[in-house]
Amino acid sequence: MAAGRTGAGSVKRKQGWTLLLLALPFIAVVFVFYYVPLFGWVYGFFDYKPGIPLNRSEFVGLKYLRIAFTEQEMDLARVLKNSLALSFLGILVSPLYVAFAILLNEMRGKLLRKWVQVTTTLPNFISWVLVYSVFYVFFAVSDGVVNNVLIKLEWLARPFNFLGNSEIAWGFQTLVGLWKGLGWGAIIYLAAIAGIDQELYDAAKVDGAGRFRTIWHITVPGIMPTFVVLLLLNVSNMLNNGFEQYYVFYNALVADKLDVIDYYVYRVGLENNDFSYSTVLGMFKTIVSVVVLFTVNGIAKRIRGESII
């Protein structure tokens, strides 16, 4: 028996080393693209100007951090407000991914279900430039399809500027993100549904439970742990709104609502050539995100009895 356990342990160790070797290239990519750039944070402590070597730049310490919270505090407050508001709206619509996954799972027609899933997943692979082109065709003021239809139906007296109205900018961008990511976001919930024990559904049918009761008492509780983990990760990632979406939809009419922290860092660093200040802003976002992540992880550990990281 001892020899058998030793042999099994040896096989497991061999498999472990094999898996580690397979993972090494991906670990190297993560290190190169996510950890090596952290050395660039040193620019935030120097008065760096393009074309001048860093060792000849003046060391200014926390000067740009003080600027962020004194001279530029209004801009920083506005950017943080936009980032948090858009992230909160994204979290608010996150149950729709669960609902869509459940509806897909309940569709009886196999071909129709596959068609719907493929159709709703494809937008995730479309670049944001093409997404903007699609929405411009539909929602442009002058010749947009939506405005033309609504005016012909006499629901609007004059064209409505969907892409340039700051009052609806947050909601409109949330719907754009939902359209682009609905099918892709539902995949992980479909996987969670597939992992639910089929015997539970069979027992429910024997007990006379209908489709709605089966969903409510078996499917929803079965995928709730997955939803909670993803929700907590989204909460900890609230400052990472992304860049591409707000870059392509940004214009002067909605500038006050779509200027999120990632786009603000881009404007300060690359458009204004203030690399030191933009580096400090990026550092601030990273540090706050890490703090929020570990805070949420602690809350999850208290509530669920286990951490998410």
Image: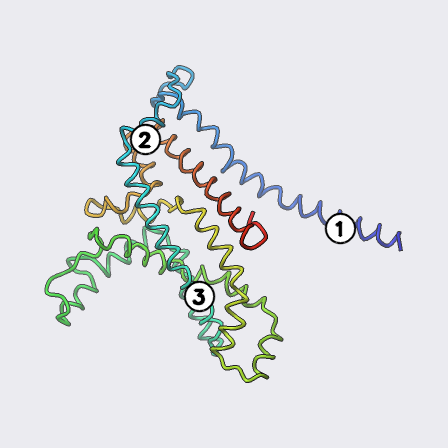
Which mark is first along the chain, 1 or 3?
A: 1
Q: For mark 2, what is the residue?
A: 69
Relative to 188, is 52 on the left or the right? left
Q: Quadrant of residue 282?
A: top left
Tell me the colour scheme of the image: rainbow
Q: Position of residue 151 (x, y in %)?
A: 14, 67
Position of the N terminus, as image quadrant, is: bottom right
Q: Residue at x 27, y 49 (%)?
A: 249
Name the amino acid type tagged 1.
Answer: Lys
Indicate the secondary structure of the residue bearing disc 1. helix
Above or below, comparing residue 285 to residue 60 in the picture: below
Name the residue beneath numbered marker 1: 12
What residue is shown at x 32% (from left), y 56% (from top)?
A: 174
Q: Is residue 105 above or below residue 295?
A: below
Residue 164 x/y as whole percent: 20, 52
Quarter location, residue 240: top left
Crowding around mark 3 (Cα neighbors within 10 Å: few <14, some 14 to 19, many 20+) is few
| Amino acid type at mark 2 | Phe
